[in-house]
Image: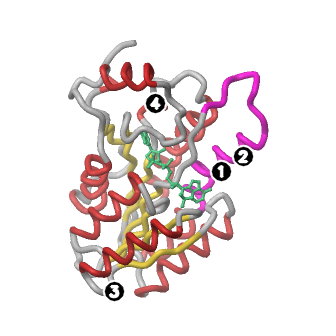
Amino acid sequence: MDPNSVVLVTGAARRIGADVARHLHALGCSVVVHYRRSAGDANRLVDALNAARAGSAIAVEADLSQMRECARLVAAATGWKGRLDALVNNASSFYRTPVGAIDERQWSELVDGNLKATLFTSQAAVPPLRESGGAIVNVCDVHTERPLPQFSVYTAAKAGVVALTRALALELAPRVRVNAIAPGSLDWPETGVFSEAERRAGEAAIPLGRLGTGEDVARAVAFLLFGNDYVTGHVLAVDGGASLVSR
Ligand SMILES: NC(=O)c1ccc[n+]([C@@H]2O[C@H](COP(=O)([O-])OP(=O)(O)OC[C@H]3O[C@@H](n4cnc5c(N)ncnc54)[C@H](OP(=O)(O)O)[C@@H]3O)[C@@H](O)[C@H]2O)c1
């Protein structure tokens, strides 16, 4: 990896995105930590990264449901050191939408926060990534193949991200590679969206015997960004084998 590589990770203030940012930073990247509302967490993370290596991280706020905000974020990231080598589209919103009670606000929030954000952030990043010969990794979800009941809007949005990954991989080759990670169950959402019984059943169904971690995702992201430049359009399940089990 070029030690001057600049990586933009969206939704990176906390949880999985923060683990991805820390991991790529530890590999030598300079990291742009994108956040929307979690300014305190983003700034604490950036301070820690800069304490480890001066001038190696910045935080940039943006609401990625707006196309112009996606473009502003990428411009800030690229303007920082005059280059962009990688984009990790990790930001997401996630909640139940039982059929019969789905409204347009939920549709917009879930589709825009997952699919629209991924498209317009990627589109804005294409010129600098073409210049650097860089790569994109989209974080989707293994449940696009085996949906969870009551999450149809989120599932459809993430399935769109899978389709987008393949479409952009084709369109942006040979200069820019585009891949995706499909995590299974990682850190449970903090919003209490899953009951205790659902959590227990979910964990019991993982052949490798444990929940995934942000570090598991981060190592897969690093592989797709920097580990093999002959892989594009691939969706890598990081789910402990959960998608192999019949329900
Ligand atoms: N956790 C799991 O078990 C799991 C399983 C499968 C797939 N995944 C995928 O893995 C990724 C990381 O998961 P996670 O649980 O760590 O995600 P998360 O906590 O649900 O969300 C990550 C961040 O996305 C940002 N975000 C949401 N909507 C946004 C918007 N409109 N504009 C800008 N930022 C926005 C939020 O930033 P602020 O806090 O700054 O507002 C949030 O902290 C996601 O893509 C998720 O779908 C997770």
Secondary element under disc 4, as helix, strand or loop, is helix
Disc number lying in front (3 or 4): 3
Which label is found at residue 112? Answer: 1
Q: CA distance from mark 3 to mark 4?
A: 38 Å
Q: CA distance from mark 1 to mark 3?
A: 32 Å
Amino acid type at mark 2: Ser
Q: Are marks 2 and 1 in contact (CB under 8 Å)?
A: yes
Precedes in sequence: disc 3 or disc 2: 3
Q: Are marks 1 and 4 in contact (CB under 8 Å)?
A: no
Taking the spot 27% from the left edge, 28% from the top edge, the residue there is 241
Q: CA distance from mark 1 to mark 4?
A: 19 Å
Precedes in sequence: disc 2 or disc 4: 2
User: Which quarter of the figure has residue 103?
Assistant: top right
The answer to whether residue 49 is above or below residue 121 is below
On the rendered structure, is 215 left or right of 130?
Answer: left
Q: Respond yes or no on whether mark 1 lies under 8 Å from ligand 1.
A: yes
Answer few, some or many: residues within 10 Å of disc 4's Cα (few below 14, many 20 plus, some between 14 and 19). Answer: many
Taking the spot 24% from the left edge, 78% from the top edge, the residue there is 52
Amino acid type at mark 1: Asp
On the rendered structure, is 177 left or right of 151?
Answer: left
Secondary element under disc 3, as helix, strand or loop, is loop
Reading the image, the residue beneath label 4 is 143
Which label is found at residue 108? Answer: 2
Amino acid type at mark 4: His
Q: Magenta segment range?
A: 96-120
Secondary element under disc 1, as helix, strand or loop, is helix
Q: Is residue 98 magenta?
A: yes
Which label is found at residue 55? Answer: 3
